[in-house]
Each structure stands twice: as C-alpha cells, then as structure tokens.
Amino acid sequence: MRIKSTGLGKTELIGHIENIKRVDDYLVISMRTAEPVRWHVRIALTPKDIRQMIRAGLSGSNVVYVLSKLFDKREAAPLKEY
C-alpha cells in the first residue's frame, strides 16, 4: 500500500494492513509503514465512514476494477501523482 499526506510533502510511505477489528462502535484498521519510516497507524471508522466507503467502492468502474484485480498478484507500478 502506498500512502501520501500533505503533511509529509512529497514523501510516500510504503505499508500494509496488519489487522481490522471492531472496538465498541468503531472498525479499527491497524497499519504498519515500513519505508521510509516505521510507524503504527490506526484508523477508527464510524458506521457512517463504512457506508461512505462501500458507496464509493460500488460506484461505476470501481467494481469492475476490483473484480479484475482480485487475483492479480503483480505489484502495481508507483503512481507519479495522486
């Protein structure tokens, strides 16, 4: 997974999802970044956030893309800008 933030300038973090678990009324996603720094990042999603993600994921060509890449094991080339 590639992660960018306006707070990091042009720095791109490389990381992976470690765990997803329910904590009270939240879905907590734990991520570890490996490059260029080692961070433990946690995201707490509310039910509203989850609905928005599902709605965005099911829109238009996103479904076709996800289904076509579901079993593709090749690593994607880095994006120039996103």
Image (cartoon, rainbow, N blue to C red):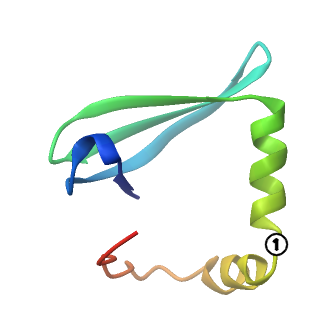
Residue 22 as seen in the image, left or right of residue 12: right
Image mark count: 1
Q: Identify the image quadrant of residue 58.
A: bottom right
**What amino acid does circle 1 point to?**
Ser
Percent across and percent down for residue 64 are: 75, 85
* Residue at which label 1 appears: 59
Percent across and percent down for residue 2 are: 36, 59
Relative to 41, does residue 55 appear above or below in the rendering? below
Q: Residue at x 77, y 77 (%)?
A: 63
Q: Identify the image quadrant of residue 14.
A: bottom left
Q: Residue at x 73, y 23 (%)?
A: 26
Task: Identify the element where label 1 is drawn.
Answer: loop
Q: Residue at x 40, y 69 (%)?
A: 82
Pick the residue in front: 18 or 55.
Answer: 55
Q: Residue at x 41, y 49 (%)?
A: 16
- The quadrant of the rendering that contains the N terminus is bottom left
Residue 32 as seen in the image, left or right of residue 25: left
Pick the residue in front: 8 or 47.
Answer: 8
Percent across and percent down for residue 38 are: 21, 35
Residue 3 as seen in the image, left or right of residue 61: left
Q: Residues within 10 Å of mark 1 (few under 14, many from 20)?
A: few
Relative to 26, does residue 79 appear above or below in the rendering? below
**Farthest-out residue, top:** 24
Percent across and percent down for residue 23 are: 70, 16
